[in-house]
Image (cartoon, rainbow, N blue to C red):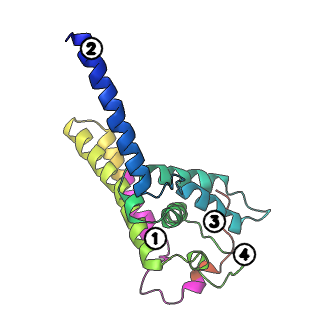
């Protein structure tokens, strides 16, 4: 048998194997090949807070970036798309020092109106924030070792981020029983 003939047979067998396993995979997931992404949930969430006086486009852009970066982790396996979208939106608000108020029910935290578990939201947000803290530390360490000034700048950025997160009123904390006082303030500032 020639080499060309052997390669054709291997290719034909490979195609059959792939097709067999593709069908097996589709049967396993019940042919549900429509994937629910966090992006649609993010847009629906922001739509709830939309009013004519506030531009949320920058808020959405940053939250969208956080969602993109969540795919570099195992978050999509651990949390629902709605929780990932909410954690991205929450982290964006925390980072910018803004607050979201649900216009339909301003007395409740916005995530409760969306039926999102507070502890799950806190866990997902912490996991997403840890991604950025690790990046800052990694760049800081590598640039310091090389003698670059960038490492010092990143350390300052790390400290600034920590201070900003500490100085922003905690929306999610067991100690904060009066959540409505945090969320019932004026709508978020224009970013």
Q: Residues within 10 Å of mark 4 (few under 14, many from 20)?
A: some
Q: Which residue is mark 1?
A: 167
Q: Nearer the viewer, mark 1 or mark 4?
A: 4
Q: Which mark is residue 45?
A: 3
Q: Residue at x 46, y 72 (%)?
A: 121
SS for tag 1? helix
SS for tag 3? helix
Q: Which mark is residue 5?
A: 2
At which x and y percent is residue 156?
36, 52
SS for tag 2? helix
Q: CA distance from mark 3 to mark 2?
A: 58 Å
State which tag comes first along the sequence, 1 or 4.
4
Mark 3 and 2 residues: CB-CB less than 8 Å, in contact? Answer: no
Residue 126 against residue 136 in the figure, above or below:
below
Q: Which residues are magenta?
A: 157-181
Residue 48 placement: quadrant: bottom right
Q: Residues within 10 Å of mark 2 (few under 14, many from 20)?
A: few
State which tag comes first along the sequence, 4 or 2.
2
In the shown orientation, is residue 125 left or right of residue 96? left
Query: Would you say residue 101 sits in the magenta stretch?
Result: no
State which tag comes first along the sequence, 2 or 1.
2
Q: Residue at x 53, y 62 (%)?
A: 85
SS for tag 4? loop
Q: Which mark is residue 103?
A: 4
In the shown orientation, is residue 136 left or right of residue 35? left
Q: Nearer the viewer, mark 3 or mark 4?
A: 3
Residue 153 against residue 131 in the figure, above or below:
above
Q: CA distance from mark 4 to mark 2?
A: 69 Å
Q: Residues within 10 Å of mark 3 (few under 14, many from 20)?
A: many
């Amino acid at each position: 048998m020639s080499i060309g003939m052997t390669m054709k047979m291997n290719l034909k067998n490979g195609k059959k194997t792939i097709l067999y396993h593709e069908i097996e995979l589709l049967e396993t997931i019940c042919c549900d090949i429509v994937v629910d992404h966090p992006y649609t949930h993010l847009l629906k969430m922001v739509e709830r807070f939309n009013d004519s006086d506030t531009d949320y486009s920058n808020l959405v852009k940053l939250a969208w970036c956080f969602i993109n970066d969540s795919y570099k982790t195992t978050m999509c396996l651990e949390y629902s798309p709605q929780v990932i979208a909410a954690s991205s939106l929450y982290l964006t608000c925390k980072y910018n020092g803004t607050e979201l108020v649900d216009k339909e029910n301003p007395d409740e935290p916005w995530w409760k109106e969306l039926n999102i578990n507070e502890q799950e939201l806190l866990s997902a947000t912490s996991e997403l924030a840890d991604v950025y803290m690790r990046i800052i530390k990694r760049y800081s360490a590598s640039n310091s070792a090389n003698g670059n000034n960038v490492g010092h700048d990143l350390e300052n950025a790390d400290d600034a981020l920590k201070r900003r997160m500490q100085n922003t009123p905690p929306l999610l904390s067991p100690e904060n029983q009066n959540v409505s006082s945090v969320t019932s303030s004026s709508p978020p500032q224009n970013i």
